[in-house]
Structure formats: C-alpha cells, structure tokens
Image (cartoon, rainbow, N blue to C red):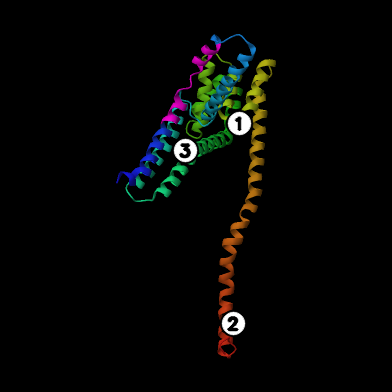
Amino acid sequence: MSYLWQPQVILLLLAVGAFLLLLAAAFTSRPSATDRRLDEMSADEANRRRYRIPAVERELKKQQARLRLIQAGLYGKNAAAAFATLRVVLFVALVVAAGALSLSGLIPLTLAVVIGLAAAILATIGPSLWLDRRKQYRQTQVRRALPDALDIISVCMEAGLSLPGALARVAKELATAHPLLALEFAIVDRETQLGRSTGDALREFAYRFDLEELRNLAAVILQAEKYGSSLTRTMQVYSETLRQKRHQRAEELAQKASIKILFPTLFCIFPAMFVVIMGPAVIRIYEFFTENGLGVGG
C-alpha cells in the first residue's frame, strides 16, 4: 500500500518544500545586514561593482513592490510581509488541497498535479492583478472627486482661509460624499502640521496614487509657493481645467459606448428581432405551401 501512495506523498512534500522556499525568500532579505557586509568588503572597485550592484537592484525591486502596495492603499508597515505571506499561503493551501483530494481518491494524481500548477500561477498572478485593480479603483474615485474638492478649496480660500486650513475643512466636508479623498486630504493636513510644506505633502499624495492630475496640482502649488503668486486664482484655474478634462473624458466614454454596444446588438438583439418579425411570415408561407400541395413531401 505504501508504494501506491508514494506519488501523492511526493506531491505533498514538494508543496511543503515550496512553502519553505517562498517563506524564506519573503522574510530573509535584510538590507541593513547587506550594507554592513558591503562596508566590510575590500575597497577594490571590481569587488564593489560585483557585489554592490546586485544589492542595489534588490533594493530597487523591494522599493517598487512597496510602491505598488502604497498605490493600492496598503499603507501599513507590515503590508509587504503580509502580502508575501498571502501569496505563500494561497499557493500552499491550493496545493495541499489538491494533494488531499488525491490521497482521498476523489481525483486522480494527474489532475492534482494540474491543480498544483494552476495554484502556482494563481498565487503568482492573482494578487498582482488584485493590486492593479485596487489601484485603478482608487484612481477613478479620486479623479472624479478632485474637481469638486478644488472648488470648495477655492471658496474657502476666498473666504480668508489658508491652503492648509482649506484642506482641513474640505477633509471634514467631503467625508460623506468622497471618503477616500477626504482621508487623503486629512493625511496631507497632518503632514503640514508636522512641518512639511503643503506642496511637498501634495506631492506625496500624488506619489501614493500615481495620478497625473495630482502631480500637476502639486507642481502648480509648489510653483505658486516658490514665486508668491495667488493660490486662490491658481486653484480656480486648475479646478476649471480638471472640470473640462472630466467633461472631455465623459464625451470620450460616450463615443466609445456606441461602438461597444454594436456587438451585443448584432449577436443578441438582432437575432431575437429577426425571429419575432420573420417567424410569423415563415409559418404562413409554410402553411400556404402545405395547403396547396407544394411542400417538399408533395
């Protein structure tokens, strides 16, 4: 009996080994230890290039992964470790489930191996697709809410509030209508209270969303702070620009809708209309030929 179960046992051992390898890759990277090791190495330029460049590349990859998490709204300190753990757990859970089904005899070993490969692909691609989807959703929400928020900021500044005060006011007023933008404005307000300039805080805001409108807004405010121009007029002009872009984007989507609806119309609506309109005529023609002995059988 042990010989019959050997392939399934091997599959489970491979799953456990993959789990340990992925877990080690997720948690054993320590940049600080690497930097200390590099400082202790020889001053020879060839050795420096040999060892430091891969370390820099690894650090850049970690920063890019961290940036993806931030742009998806995962600001937690342990978000990267939790995301890596999610991938590992997802992979191992699916592979172990496939092995358990194979051991119980519910599915053959070949199907279990296929499920294990599909689990590896899903654990690799699925979380990344989820991050991209979440990032796009956040960008859409902020893009829609930003023109209205800038209008309120302009009104507040015309009433005598400073830009940080207007941001704090908008964060409270938009908490119900646009909670995501209100939360981000609250973060910007907290950063300005800690000593950062409003332009720099908005630039970090744009960094968290990777949105062109926010980058332009940060650049406009930084330029206004640098040259001392009127922030109220600047916000009004930029708000009008965003409103025009939103109108143009709506027109673009409306133009695309006519093309997108063409295929459902051709393949779903027209066949049904053809049956409803032509069906009675076909039946009448068939009855006419049958009554006059002109049918195929006649």
The kind of residue on which mark 3 rests is: Ala
- Looking at the magenta stretch, what is its main secondary structure? helix
The kind of residue on which mark 1 rests is: Leu
Q: Mark 3 packing: few (<14 Cα in 10 Å), some, or many (20+)?
A: many
Residue 1 placement, left or right of 275: left
Q: Whole-percent x and y of residue 283?
A: 55, 79
Residue bearing the label numbered 2: 285
Q: Label for residue 63?
A: none
Q: Cβ–Cβ below 8 Å for labels 2 and 1? A: no
Residue bearing the label numbered 1: 211
The span picked out in magenta is: 20-38
Residue 295, image quadrant: bottom right
In magenta stretch: residue 22: yes
Going 41% across and 30% down the picture, which residue do you hit? 20
Q: Whole-percent x and y of residue 74?
A: 48, 29
In magenta stretch: residue 106: no
Residue bearing the label numbered 3: 123
Sequence-wise, the earlier of marks 2 and 3 is: 3
Q: Mark 2 packing: few (<14 Cα in 10 Å), some, or many (20+)?
A: few
Sequence-wise, the earlier of marks 3 and 1 is: 3
